[in-house]
Image: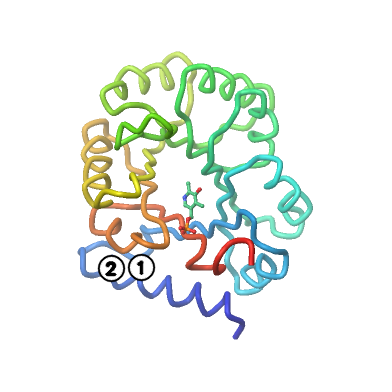
Amino acid sequence: MNQIAQNIEIIQKTIAKAAKRAGRKAEDVHLVAVSKVQPDDKIEAALSAGHRLFGENRVQEAQSRWHERRAHYPDLKLHLIGPLQTNKAKDAVALFDVIETLDREKLARGLAAEMQKQGRKLPCFIQINTGDEDQKAGINPRNLPEFLELCRDECGLDIRGLMCIPPVDEPPALHFALLKKLAKEHGLPGLSMGMSADFEKAIPLGATYVRVGTGVFGARGL
Ligand SMILES: *Cc1c(COP(=O)(O)O)cnc(C)c1O
């Protein structure tokens, strides 16, 4: 078995154990393999291992990595997990299956217009800046009710859940718990939270998608 296949198997087992401990079903926690900056041979290894769910944080890079491969893997699912500029909404809607980083009105309107044009209604997650960090994308938790209403009622977007990236210097579980609480208050079923270092902690707090890059592929840029 190749190294990537082995990593995926180990992570899936860890997910399954964490889910079981939490009284959840393993199949309710999906592994998004974050393939940004990873070389082709590692991507191919993950695909050969049967993995089909990937996350990318830049539209152009994702296009060059996935545009052709898509044709060979009809069951491929691509999540956009990085900040999206409104002028890239067209390309993002054409390429991705799920947008996880919806975080402002202009983008909501731009995405809605593109989805309508392309006849593609993509599930979206709203990114929450749970740590209220200036440099980080995502809406402030207190603006969620208003933003959710705009996304759903005015833009007609299909909002499936919430996503967060906790501050590096704080216990991630606090942020996962906050995201869970917000999702529950608004009846949203999806929670995208947890990365290589902390995905196990996100599962008892309700993660439905964990985004794991280095844990699957090894360090980026090697
Ligand atoms: C890169 C990235 C990840 C994966 O990070 P790892 O620490 O490599 O698992 C997860 N989420 C987002 C938003 C990212 O940009």
Q: How many marks?
A: 2
- Return the residue nearer the eye: 4 or 29: 4
Give the quarter of the figure containing the C terminus: bottom right
Give the quarter of the figure containing the N terminus: bottom right
- Cα gap from disc 2 to disc 1, whole angstroms: 5 Å
Residue type, numbered disc 2: Ala
Residue 131 position, x and y percent, is 30, 37
Residue 152 position, x and y percent, is 42, 21
- Name the residue that disc number 1 marks: 15
Residue furthest top in the image:
154
Residue type, numbered disc 1: Ile
- Badge 2: how crowded within 10 Å, few (<14), some, or many (20+)? many
Taking the spot 47% from the left edge, 17% from the top edge, the residue there is: 105
187 lies above or below 206: above
36 lies above or below 142: below
- Name the residue that disc number 2 marks: 18
